[in-house]
Amino acid sequence: MFARALIASLALVGAAQAEDEVSEGGILNPPELTLEGQLERLRRGDLGPMMGAYGYVAAKSGNHSIAREIFSDIAESGNVQAMTWMSWIEDNGLGGLENPDAAAEWDRRAMEAGSEIGMFNYGLDLLRGRGVPSDQARGQALIREAASLGLEAAERLVANDFDLDVVTPDGDNWKYEKRLY
């Protein structure tokens, strides 16, 4: 519900600011709340506390190249949630080519920054051998640790003896099939 309200609000603000007027004193109604305005701020190095919300709006509205740009900069600054978003973007080839190696690297970085979600995702990468060499023992250990921290998806996977179908949407199964080519 919040996401829909945020997207609608940003769309209205963007529409209202579409025709900025320039006066002697500067721009009237500057595009500070539009996605384009936020991208300008990002490109000037101003990450701001709300930049992740704009990345979320971009990702959920299908503007994946913009989401990639926003989350990449935020993730590089050390934001763990943005690292998780970058993993999702890279793993699914959104706004660029699919890159399982980069996705696994973002998961590893998020884990090392203290994220139980990053730990869980990196454990999955190791179990699947996607983006990193397969390491069943280490993958299971990381997922057990994420479960001990209270991550429900990890708890569910452990309770189901690491049956990956428990946490994998059917539509993603093709990604994890072992290919002979």
Image: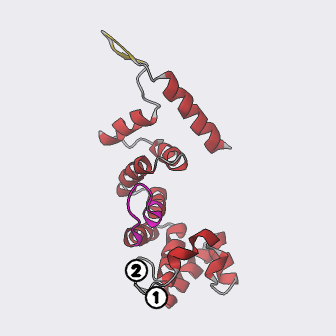
Q: Any magenta on residue 181? A: no
Say whether residue 150 is visible.
no
Q: Pointer 2: what residue?
A: 132
Q: Note whether 124 is above or below 57 in the view shown.
A: below
Q: Where in the figure is residue 13, as x and y percent of width and height?
A: 52, 27
- In the image, residue 157 lies at what x, y percent? 65, 79
Query: For residue 181, what is the image quadrant?
Result: bottom left
Q: Residue at x 31, y 41 (%)?
A: 43
The residue where tag 1 is placed is 135
Span colored in magenta: 89-100
- Amino acid type assigned to the residue bearing label 1 in the image: Asp
Point out residue 99 in the picture as x, y percentages from the top left corner.
39, 68
Identify residue type, mark 2.
Val
Q: Nearer the viewer, residue 73 or 146?
A: 73
Indicate which disc residue 118 carries.
none
Q: Are marks 2 and 1 in contact (CB under 8 Å)?
A: yes
**Percent from the top left, x then y, of residue 134?**
45, 86
- Secondary structure, mark 2, is loop
Front residue of 39 and 96: 96
Q: Is residue 128 left or right of residue 72?
A: right
| Residue located farthest toward the top when viewing the structure as drawn | 24
C-alpha span from label 2 to label 1: 9 Å
Q: Is the N terminus in the top left, top right, bottom left or bottom right quadrant?
A: top right
| Image vertical order of residue 176 relative to residue 18, above or below | below
Crowdedness near tag 1: few (<14), some (14–19) or many (≥20) residues, C-alpha within 10 Å: some
Label 2: how many Cα within 10 Å (few below 14, some 14–19, many 20+): some
Q: How are the residues colored? A: secondary structure
Q: State the residue at coordinates (41%, 41%).
A: 48
The residue positioned 56% from the left and 28% from the top of the image is 12
71 horizontally vs 12: left or right: left
